[in-house]
């Protein structure tokens, strides 16, 4: 049975969520810390390119997983949140050699 790219991205996002350690960060956002605020996360929409999201977040993030098949690629990236004990992950896909676009996002915010 052949899996479609969104299914691979969704599976990778779930797997990354289970494997990613929730990082301890400071509670204040600044350009020097390169972290993602709740407001920035809310602005990230399906179909946006990774380049645009990286620019909006002020960081390139950390690649957690990736797969390539049939001329397509799928990657899951984690980004450092600005709040302590929180996590931010985004799944991207695209044609090999082309831009990656966001398929899904997942977060856990502490209060």
Image: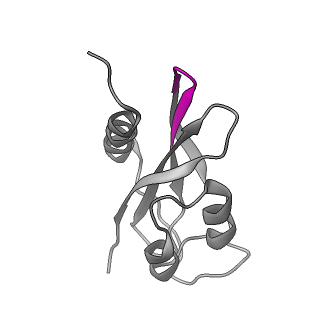
Task: Say if 21 sits above or below 39 in the image.
Answer: above
Instruction: Residue 89: give x, y in percent of width and height.
Output: 44, 55
Q: Left or right: where does residue 13 sit relative to residue 98?
A: left
What color scheme is it? Answer: one colour
Residue at position x 33%, y 42% from top? 10
Figure quadrant of the N terminus: top left
Residue at position x 43%, y 76% from top? 42
Instruction: Residue 76: give x, y in percent of width and height.
Output: 49, 44
The count of marks equals: 0
Instruction: Residue 17: give x, y in percent of width and height.
Output: 35, 47
Query: Is-magenta flag for residue 90?
Result: no
Task: Say if 51 sits above or below 70 in the image.
Answer: below
| Residue furthest left in the image | 1
Q: Which residues are magenta?
A: 68-75
| Residue furthest right in the image | 32
| Residue furthest top in the image | 1
Residue at position x 68%, y 58% from top? 51
Helix, strand or loop for the magenta stretch, by majority? strand
Figure quadrant of the C terminus: bottom left
Residue nearer the viewer, 66 or 72: 72
Residue nearer the viewer, 34 or 89: 89
Residue nearer the viewer, 68 or 86: 68
Query: Is-magenta flag for residue 73?
Result: yes
Instruction: Residue 45: give x, y in percent of width and height.
Output: 46, 67
| Image quadrant where residue 59 sits | bottom right
């Amino acid at each position: 049975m052949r899996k479609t790219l969104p299914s691979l991205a969704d599976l990778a996002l779930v797997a990354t969520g289970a494997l990613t350690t929730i990082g301890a960060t400071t509670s204040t956002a600044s350009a020097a810390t390169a972290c993602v605020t709740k407001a920035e996360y809310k602005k990230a929409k399906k179909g946006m390119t990774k380049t645009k999201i990286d620019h909006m977040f002020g960081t390139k993030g950390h690649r957690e997983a990736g797969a390539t098949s049939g001329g397509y690629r799928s990657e899951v990236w984690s980004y450092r949140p600005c709040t302590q004990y929180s996590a931010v992950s985004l799944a991207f896909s695209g044609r090999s050699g082309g831009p990656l676009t966001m398929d899904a996002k997942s977060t856990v915010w502490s209060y």
